[in-house]
Structures are given as C-alpha cells and as structure tokens.
Image (spheres, rainbow, N blue to C red):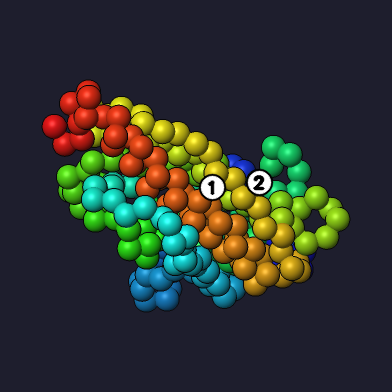
Amino acid sequence: MRHNRDSDRSLGGAGPTRRGLLVGAGALVPLAVPLALGGCASLLVNGPPPALYRLSPKSTFPDDLPSVNWQLVLETPVADAGLNTPRIALTQAAHQIEYYARANWTDRAPAMFQTMMIESFENSGRIVSVGRESLGLRADFVLKSELREFQAVYDGSGPPVVRVGLALKLVGMPRREIVASTDIDRIAPAADDSLQDVVAAFDQAAGAVLKDLVIWVLSSGERGLARLPAEGGIGS
C-alpha cells in the first residue's frame, strides 16, 4: 500500500506527509497547553501513535557450527543518521531516504540489531559468553559493525525488496588486532506492498544476515585464536 509511506519525508527534512503530522529532526514539539486549560502540561498528539514492530533473532544453525570457549563483546553497530532511528526506512530514488508513516521499530535500528545479534549468539549455544560493552565482560574478541543497509527498496515495478547489510570487523583483545573482516549483505522480496509483508521481508533478510554473521564470527575467531598465541595470545 503505497499510501502507507511518508513519501514527502526525505533525509534531513521535516516537510508535510500524506498521513498526518510527523516530527522531524530539529522540529519543536509543543509540550504545554495554554494557561486557559488550567496550566496542565500534556503532549499534543495528532492522530494515533505509530505501530511498533520488532524482528526475530536467529535460532537455527548448521550442525557443524564450531563451539568456542572464548568471550565476545558486541559493540552497537554504527550507522548514518538516516538509519540511526526507530523509523522504518525506504528508498524510491537514489540518494534519498524516506520512512513509512505511523510505523516504527521498537528501538533505533542499530540498537535493535545489536540485541538480535546477541540473542542469535546465545541461541546458537556454541559460545561461552556474549554481551554488550556495558556489561564489563573480559572480552577475548570485540565485534565492530556498521549497519550500511536497512531499508525497503522500491524500483517502481511492484512490491519492494528489503536490503540488510553489515560491515564487520573481528578484533582480538587485548592487542586490538583485526583478525578478520567481511561484509554481509542479503535481500528479501516483500510478498506484497503492505507494511506487514514489508516487515516480514525485513525479518527474512535480517535473519539471513544474523545466521551468516554467527557462523562467520565463530569460525573466524577460532582461526584467529590459532594465530594469536605466537604474538602474545588472547588474554595475555
């Protein structure tokens, strides 16, 4: 349904939309009602709140996935301003990003993806410990990532194709040596041009990325671990 998209909202803009008022970066939201209403403060809301969506972590992996006895810390993925938002992104033209109206992720896209990565590693059952930086884990490896693609792409020929892409660097600690790097990019076509089908395509593409990410990190970490002892070793 094309009318579900905020087709007039481009990166950095705060213009009008097809379906109600959306507040952009730098816009002022009135927080207090006039004194004539008794001085009570409230948030003025135009229309219903946005629907919230979340994606699923990966839970199935190959039987030959290696088990590892080291600990992993996952930094929050970095992302440009267009993706570092809870809004669900789409593109209809090169160099322009827009958002679906009245629909948000449950968190900023990078933070949501970090949570899905952690849960996917935990679901694999093949790693001793995995967590965020804030937990203070003694990390044997740190995974640095950049969320480069996380949008539905419309080419004018029907329902969109969802694209999810990560750039990854696995860093051995405490020397902070990059032991491996790669890019993972997956696409999934939406069955129809409805928000539910688009979110399902996001889930499919993100799931494929998460599966490949877990396999790559565990395998690359084991290979890196075999090389690092000659240079001091992990945890030395």
Q: Residues within 10 Å of mark 1 (few under 14, many from 20)?
A: many
Q: Nearer the viewer, residue 95 or 70?
A: 70
Q: Amino acid at mark 2?
A: Ile
Q: Amino acid at mark 1?
A: Leu
Which residue extends farthest right?
Answer: 157
Which residue extends farthest left?
Answer: 236
Q: Which residue is mark 1?
A: 83
Secondary element at tag 2: loop
Secondary element at tag 1: loop
From the viewer's perspective, tell me whether residue 172 is left or right of residue 191. left
In the image, what residue occupies the spot 19% across and 49% down? 137
The image position of residue 152, as x and y in percent, is 67, 55
Which residue extends farthest top?
Answer: 231
From the viewer's perspective, tell me whether residue 9 is left or right of residue 77. right
Q: Which residue is mark 2?
A: 97
In the image, what residue occupies the spot 20% across and 52% down? 135
Quadrant the C terminus occupies:
top left
